[in-house]
Amino acid sequence: MKLAAVTNEVAPLTEAGTLDTILRTAVDHGITIFEARTVEGKRFPLLTGQAWEVLKGAQQKYGITYSAASAGNFIGVQIGSDLIDLHKGALWTMSMDMAEKLSINTLITFAPQRSATADKTEFDQVVELLGEVVDSAAARGIDVQLENLPGTWADTSDGCLALLEAVDRKTFGYVWDTGNLYEAEKQTFEEGFEKLKPYIRNVHLKDGQFIDGKMTWQHYGTGKTNVKGQIEALKSIGYDGTLALEAARIPHVAGDFEASLGYLRTIL
């Protein structure tokens, strides 16, 4: 398994000019694979010119490669919103354009938000939408990965499986985000893993538990999501893809990344 850092999960730095410090911190800890997400407070691909130049230059400066990019497509957007076409069109096209410039061959997408009257008709519309997104990326040699998130059509393991099976494209895989699944399902990973393991192409790793009814992110090994068990499960299927460290707590403070990385290395 290959460890990857996420651009906004390494250090609590969001000000302009701090990206280089973030990248260098991960490199100093032996990680040179990154997922491009939020950079200096702005979500990929809507970056400032300065941050964009740093992101590009880091490939040569630090030997960094980018495993995936995530523009946050469709987060919080219901299928009937006029934002759907804007995300599917302008935002997705810009994401593909910029991914190509960074030699990124994988984009992450989310599913639209479930409406209060979610039914099969809405599900079918989501399937059609995701199929169009995947096909447009495939035409440019880019794979797409679905990330689960509470409140969306890809919230639980069953919800993710239904979409993956219905969209049914070879270039459409799954980001196994164990923390988000725990938040949605309120149970550990085992049952969902058995369902989703054929589709796992990437892993987002975070730990936490419900405290006073609220999901609270914690250092790896101190929460209830069973990070050690997740690693053992991945080993059992010979998973050799990326483990993206989502190590930031709320509030994100200095040392979160280092603490969780230290624990993770003891169980790999």
Image: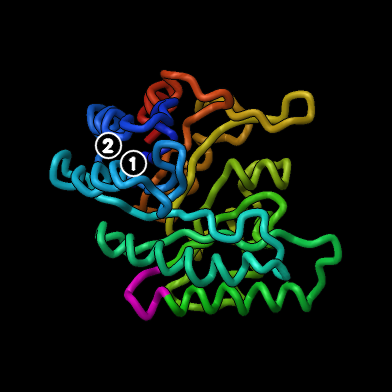
Tell me how far mark 1 sits from mark 2, CA to CA: 6 Å
As drawn, is 24 to the left or to the right of 146? left
> Nearest the camera: 106 or 37?
37
* Residue 156 visible in the picture: no
Mark nearer the N terminus (1 vs 2): 1
Q: What amino acid type is highlighted by mark number 1?
A: Leu
Percent x, y for residue 168?
54, 78
Q: Are marks 1 and 2 in contact (CB under 8 Å)?
A: yes
Q: Residues within 10 Å of mark 2 (few under 14, many from 20)?
A: some
Q: Which mark is residue 3?
A: 1
Disc 2 secondary structure class: loop
As drawn, is 60 to the left or to the right of 124? left
Q: Quadrant of the C terminus?
A: top left
Question: Residue at the right extreme?
Answer: 117
> Nearest the camera: 228 or 3?
3
Picture quadrant of residue 27: top left
